Amino acid sequence: MPSTLSTILDELRATGSKLVAVSKTHPPEELMPLYLEGQRDFGENRIQEMATKRELMPKDIRWHAIGHLQTNKVKFIAPFVHLIHSVDSLKLLQEIDRQAEKAGRVIPCLLQMHIAKEETKFGLDREELFSLLRAPEFADMKHVEIRGLMGMATLTEDRELIRSEFRMMSVLLEELQSGFFSGKESFCELSMGMSSDYKIALEEGSTLVRIGSLLFGPRQN
Ligand SMILES: *Cc1c(COP(=O)(O)O)cnc(C)c1O
């Protein structure tokens, strides 16, 4: 659906934010039309699927890990992953740091915040965030770079609730930019907004929207 892509890109251009095309469950032949239109950022939530697609697809694609990540899977993507959006524990970050060192690189990461009402969603609360940032182990990490925050809003028809959750993220990003990450210009990304709520996310300062079904149609699983 190339026409959908260009419509979304026009909307993003106005705000300077970037599109991560969420291609999970869709085979490479469905990704290629977007690639040929110039799309380079693709998001996957399953590690095996990302690794397989990376093998089969052009090498200049930037692969984003957006889903809950198990520590024992990090090694499979460490050599190439462009950005990990879903860091939700110190333990996971330590493993990313270890695997990045082995791969001889620094892996850019976002800290995932739990902003939704659903308990099932992953992410850190405020207290967990600050305890991660204050951990001595975190201070020692040399192979991860925290670039910003990620969050998923509540799945609801209540637009104002979604807006307030995204706004909390923007406020937190600013707080960290002038506090813990002060002087670190690379700490600037807000990954928020999916097919159903990305317009609200853009209005609230999103710099990276993760859009799947709007681009690729409904998923099978
Ligand atoms: C699947 C997924 C998306 C995209 O969802 P759509 O509603 O299809 O746009 C975005 N972010 C995460 C973390 C996802 O798992």
Image: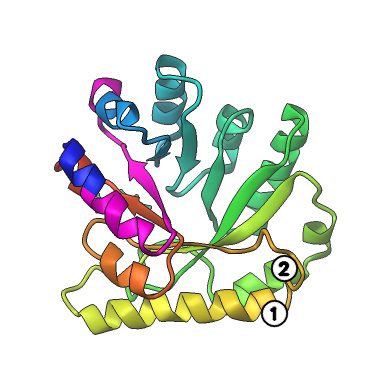
Residue plotted at (81% across, 58% down): 137
One can see residue 57 in this view: yes
Say which label, 2 or 1, has the lower sequence index. 2
Q: From the viewer's side, name the closer residue of 99 and 213.
A: 213
How many discs appear?
2
**Residue 82 occupies quadrant:** top right
Residue type beneath disc 2: Leu
Mark 1 secondary-structure assignment = helix
Quick one: 178 or 92, which is closer to the camera? 178
In reply to whether residue 22 is colored magenta, the answer given is yes
- Residue 216 vs 114, above or below: the answer is above
Residue, x 29% and y 59% (percent of image)?
A: 11
Q: Amino acid at mark 1?
A: Ser
Is residue 145 left or right of 66 when viewed as pictured?
right
| Residue underneath mark 1 | 178
Local packing at callout 1 (Cα closer than 10 Å; few below 14, some 14-19, many 20+) is few
Q: Which label belongs to residue 97? A: none
Cβ–Cβ under 8 Å for marks 2 and 1? no
Residue 20 in the image: x percent, y percent? 39, 46
Distance from disc 2 to disc 1, alpha carbons, whole Å, reads 14 Å
Please say whether residue 219 is visible from this viewpoint.
Answer: no
